[in-house]
């Protein structure tokens, strides 16, 4: 088995070119299906992305697999940076929250990935009061009084156990 030759690291300009090209094919490469047709479509799309990438004004030729790995690594780093920014934003200690350091291409990719970054909303979750807070509407006091009136039978009936 031959040892493959390692390509150089991606430069910032190559990453920008890659994210601008992948944003056009985002719906295909981020498709969560894993059937044979979808996998074939994704492979063909990565080859198309590689062709577009290599036709740009850079020197290094990249394969579809190299671009896919670089894209996935960039996505992982971006998600990690986003999580760290959220931690910094909600830290206690006062002062002004630091602004996230984000390039134009990273912010574009982050906006595309936003549905993947949102937590699953559940009213039973411990953070439900933060997520669903806007959905809670106040009940008028007249309605509360109506619900608490004696017009309704009691929900619990007590039985005497004495003989």
Image (spheres, rainbow, N blue to C red):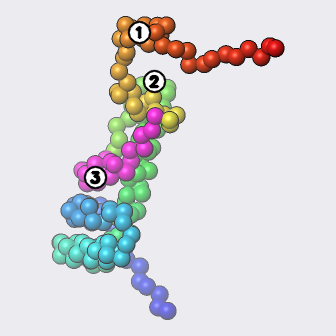
Q: Is residue 95 above or below residue 10?
A: above
One can see residue 96 in this view: no
| Location of mark 2 (residue) | 94
Indicate the secondary structure of the residue bearing disc 2.
loop
Q: 136 left or right of 87?
A: left
| Location of mark 1 (residue) | 146
Residue 112 numbered mark, or none: 3
x and y, in percent, of residue 71 in the image = 34, 64
Q: Residue at x 43, y 85 (%)?
A: 4
**Of marks 2 and 1, which one's residue comes earlier in the chain?**
2
Q: Residue at x 44, y 13 (%)?
A: 147
Find the magenta span and give its range. Answer: 102-123
Q: Nearer the viewer, residue 72 or 157?
A: 157
One can see residue 67 in this view: yes
C-alpha span from label 1 to label 3? 48 Å
Q: Are marks 1 and 3 in contact (CB under 8 Å)?
A: no
- Work out which quarter of the rendered image holds the C terminus and state it: top right
Indicate the secondary structure of the residue bearing disc 3.
helix
**Of marks 1 and 3, which one's residue comes earlier in the chain?**
3
x and y, in percent, of residue 157 in the image = 63, 17
Q: Are marks 2 and 1 in contact (CB under 8 Å)?
A: no
**Of marks 2 and 3, which one's residue comes earlier in the chain?**
2
Figure label count: 3
x and y, in percent, of residue 26 in the image = 26, 61
Q: Nearer the viewer, residue 111 or 58?
A: 111
* Residue found farthest to the right: 163
Q: 132 left or right of 125?
A: left
Q: Nearer the viewer, residue 81 or 153?
A: 153
């Amino acid at each position: 088995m031959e040892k493959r030759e390692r390509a150089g690291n991606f430069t910032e300009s190559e990453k920008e070119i890659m994210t601008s090209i992948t944003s056009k094919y985002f719906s295909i490469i981020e498709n969560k299906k894993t059937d044979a047709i979808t996998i074939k479509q994704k492979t063909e799309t990565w080859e198309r992305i590689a062709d577009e990438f290599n036709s740009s004004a850079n020197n290094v030729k990249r394969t579809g697999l190299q671009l896919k790995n670089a894209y996935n690594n960039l996505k992982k780093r971006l998600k990690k940076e986003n999580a760290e920014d959220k931690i910094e934003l909600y830290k206690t200690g006062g002062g002004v929250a630091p602004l996230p350091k984000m390039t134009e291409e990273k912010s574009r990719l982050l906006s595309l990935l936003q549905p993947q970054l949102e937590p699953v909303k559940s009213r039973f979750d411990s953070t439900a009061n933060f997520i669903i807070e806007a959905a809670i509407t106040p009940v008028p006091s007249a309605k509360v009084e109506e619900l608490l009136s004696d017009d309704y039978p009691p929900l619990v009936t007590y039985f005497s156990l004495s003989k």
